[in-house]
Image (tube, grey):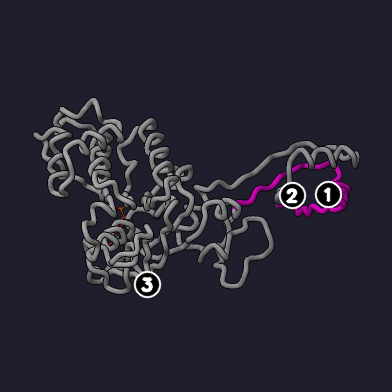
Amino acid sequence: MHDGSGRITVQGLGKSFGPVHAVRDLSFTVQPGTVTGFLGPNGSGKTTTLRMILGLIEPSTGSATVNGVPFRGLPNPGTVVGAVLEAQSFHPGRTARDHLRCYAAAMRLPDRQADQVLELVGLGTAAKRRAGGFSLGMRQRLALATALLGDPQILVLDEPSNGLDPEGIAWLRSFLKSFAATGRTVLVSSHLLREMEHTVDHVVIVSRGECVYNGHLDELRAAQRSRVLVQAADPAALVAALEREGLAAEATPDGRLAIPGADSRVVADLALEAGVALYGMQDERVDLEQLFFQLTNGQFAGAQNAPSRWGPPPAPGYGPHGGFGGNA
Ligand SMILES: Nc1ncnc2c1ncn2[C@@H]1O[C@H](COP(=O)(O)OP(=O)(O)OP(=O)(O)O)[C@@H](O)[C@H]1O
């Protein structure tokens, strides 16, 4: 019997295809009531992991459970998990409604369920059109409708925004958030953090089959560092004024001062009070995308080693290339 928790648990999961280690020792939990982003570049093992969670391929090591049991142990799994994997195919001559009615019949669901999910995904007006004439975005919506037929507790989606236009992406974002807001579970993969950053609460980032970050997106954001760069007429006087306010400054190779974590207006006010002329000021911020890029290049071991571009020297174990972009 499954526990009805809506939780997906991946424990020490690994998969090798001959010499290719597609997934290695992956462990994470997907909690109900959240949208968890499963992120990584192409070939990082996302689809392989999702297929193992869905019981489509056998793990080489470890386990994946849904509601406490392996997927194949779920009774009537379509009512527990709705899944959309890549390369969905539809009978091209069949209408969207008929496609869904076939699936509804297989799951012993009433026909009206087909119309309900078509409305839900915004395909109500296309119900009688043949799937063969659908755009990629419409096919994605039809695949999602199919996954929703059994009114599942959990959604597992592989790259669902592929082929969606900006309006479709915005729609998907609000759909997934409202699905999770009802206490249900969403696990969604993507190779684009930017596309997912306003959708997901929790992220599991993989690179070359291994987990490089597992935590809240907010914590990852907090790892972003910003700094103010200033060109001061009297750097020593400005450093003294900043230090009196508890702000540390360091000299940059180009002769400017860098003040990590500072607000540019505060720096300007302090300079004015100290009578130090400023010849230039710049706010620098490292965005999430850069951080994702760095993480997935395998340069960082995990959240506990939240990278610092300008901060203190790297912690032990940090590679020589530690740090974001810049001079790294
Ligand atoms: N059936 C298979 N036989 C051999 N190698 C495979 C097989 N399936 C996946 N791989 C390999 O495993 C690795 C991970 O692939 P996977 O499709 O899981 O990555 P992904 O992150 O989903 O990438 P993408 O976004 O491009 O689909 C890749 O090197 C891929 O070539």
Nearer-N-terminus badge (2/1): 1
Q: Is mark 2 within 8 Å of ligand 1?
A: no
Residue 323 vs 60, above or below: the answer is above
Q: Earlier in the sequence, mark 3 or mark 2?
A: 3
Q: Which residue position is annotated with label 1?
A: 242
Q: Are marks 2 and 1 in contact (CB under 8 Å)?
A: yes
Would you say the residues marked 3 and 2 are in contact, meaning their CB atoms lie under 8 Å apart? Answer: no
Is disc 3's CB within 8 Å of ligand 1? no
Q: Nearer the viewer, residue 10 or 61?
A: 10
Q: Quadrant of residue 73?
A: bottom left
Q: CA distance from mark 3 to mark 1?
A: 49 Å
Task: Name the secondary structure under disc 3.
Answer: strand
The spot of residue 186 in percent (x, y) is 38, 51
Q: Helix, strand or loop at disc 2?
A: strand
**Secondary element type, mark 1:** helix
Q: Which segment did they paint magenta?
A: 224-252
Amino acid type of the residue that numbered disc 1 sits on in the rendered structure:
Leu
Which quadrant does the C terminus fall into? bottom right
Answer above or below: position of 296 versus 161: below
Q: CA distance from mark 2 to mark 1?
A: 9 Å
Residue type of the residue flagged with mark 3: Gly
Q: Which residue is mark 3?
A: 12
Point 46% across, 63% down: residue: 212
- In terms of image quadrants, where is residue 60? bottom left
In the foreground, 120 or 192:
120
Three-letter code, disc 2: Ile
| Label 2 sits on residue | 259
Describe residue 111's horizontal placement relative to residue 315 as left or right.
Answer: left
Q: CA distance from mark 3 to mark 2?
A: 42 Å
Q: Is residue 251 magenta?
A: yes
Residue 223's disc is: none
Q: Quadrant of ligand 1?
A: bottom left
